[in-house]
Image: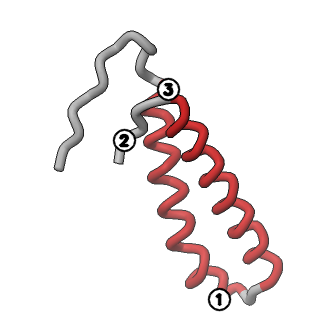
Amino acid sequence: MMIKNDQELKATQERIAYFEGLVAQLRVTTSPAEFKLMASGYLVEIERMHAEVMAYLSRHGSDPEPAEIA
C-alpha cells in the first residue's frame, strides 16, 4: 500500500503511534523472551509504515503519484 494523500498520511501516522504504544507497553509487561516474540511483528510493521511515510513526504505535493507495483 502506498500513501496517496494527506488523509492516508494522518491515518498511517496514527497507526504507527498506536503500534509504538503497544510495543512500549510490551517492554514493561512481558519477559525478555516474550517481548522478542510478541514485539517483532509490530516492529516490522512500524518500520514498513515509516518507510511509506518517508516516501510520501519525499514527494512534492504537485508530483504525480508513483505507480503501485502489484
For badge 1, the amino acid type reads Glu
User: Residue 4 appears at what percent x and percent y?
Assistant: 40, 33
First-in-chain label (1 vs 3): 1
Seen as rendered, the residue at the extreme front is 7
- Mark 1 — residue? 34
**Residue 2 disc label:** 2
**How many C-alpha atoms fall within 10 Å of the one at disc 2: few (<14), some, or many (≥20)?**
some
Q: Which residue is drawn at 50% across and 39% down?
A: 8
Q: Residue at x 74, y 89 (%)?
A: 31
Seen as rendered, the residue at the extreme top is 62
Secondary element at tag 2: loop
User: Residue 7 appears at what percent x and percent y?
Assistant: 54, 35
Find residue 64 and report its image quarter: top left
First-in-chain label (2 vs 3): 2
Q: Which residue is drawn at 45% across and 43% down?
A: 51
- Mark 3 — residue? 57
